[in-house]
Image (tube, rainbow, N blue to C red):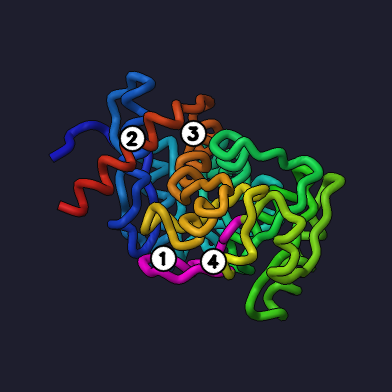
Amino acid sequence: MNSLPVLGAVLGSPVSHSLSPAIYNEAFRLQGIEASYAAINCEVHEVAQTLQDLWESRVRAVSVTMPLKEEVITYLERIDDNVGALNAANCLSRGVNGWIGHNTDGDGCCDALVEQGNANILGANAVVLGAGGTARSVALALVNRGAHVVVVNRTLAKAEELVHRVQQFCVSGGSLTIGSPSDLQNASILVNATSVGMNSTFSPVESTDLHSRLVILDAVYQPMKTQLLADGERVGARIIDGLWMLIQQARRQCVHQFGWKPDAQSLRNAAERELASRQK
């Protein structure tokens, strides 16, 4: 049993599958910090008390996963612009009198596109698949880095809702519109922010729509190489799996919570070791 003091925790329900403990424990090790990171199953009705307990325990870092990303906002001292735009927080840091909410999903995706995919986001034509919370955060981050983003979703009304909401918070020269798979012809970036491909051989787009000029990121990481990524690799596209997005958004969380950014490859190695141990 780990007897080290708890310095951070991830909240959600269910939460046992989370890779955050493995990632953060490695981050602490890299910084020479003797502390641990816990996974806490927290239901919606338990959020207020759990956050209070963690605050009083002097916990420094809280990550938030489903279904609590909206629920926690009520109990925060303040929120950053991303949380205000997305109405979702995945990261809490300590303020003066309470928790501060952040959302690092979209910027983590962009970091992975740049660092692992060598993508040039400024002025790029990007296609984002999906209209849920992940798609909203990715679309906002891409637009605010100057990309021209089209959202493709099976349900048009949800795509329209995403565009309407996110457009209100765009602060750069990028753009955001609704599109179709045909927009891939002129795109240099493709992000799958749907669950299509998770533990299956399905792809959210036809392989014939892909080409070698694309950088493709799939937010899904089970399996690590989804059908979309395999199809992209076959046509010569640069591919990035969802684990890199998870790692990069966690690195951004560490900046908010501790003021340092741990090494990406070391965090990935720790996450891969944890995934491998679960398959035994």
Residue 203 falls within the magenta-colored stretch: yes
Neighbours of disc 4 within 10 Å: few (<14), some (14-19), many (20+): many
Q: Is residue 14 left or right of residue 158?
A: left
- Magenta-drawn segment: 191-205
Q: Is residue 138 above or below residue 80?
A: below
Which disc, if any, is residue 194?
4
Cβ atoms at labels 1 and 4 below 8 Å apart: no
Task: State which tag comes first along the sequence, 1 or 2.
Answer: 1
Q: Main secondary structure of the magenta part?
A: loop
Q: Nearer the viewer, residue 25 or 269?
A: 269
Task: State which tag comes first along the sequence, 3 or 4.
Answer: 4
Q: Nearer the viewer, residue 266 or 184?
A: 184
* Residue 246 appears in the rendering: yes
Residue positioned 71% across, 38% down in the render: 120
For marks 1 and 2, give the CA distance.
21 Å
The type of residue carrying mark 4 is Thr
Q: Position of residue 262 (x, y in %)?
A: 45, 27
For marks 2 and 3, give the CA distance.
17 Å
For marks 1 and 4, give the CA distance.
9 Å
For marks 1 and 3, give the CA distance.
27 Å
Residue at the spot of label 2 = 269
The type of residue carrying mark 2 is Asn
Task: State which tag comes first along the sequence, 4 or 2.
Answer: 4
* Residue 96 appears in the rendering: no
The type of residue carrying mark 1 is Met
Task: State which tag comes first along the sequence, 1 or 3.
Answer: 1
Q: Position of residue 178 (x, y in %)?
A: 77, 69
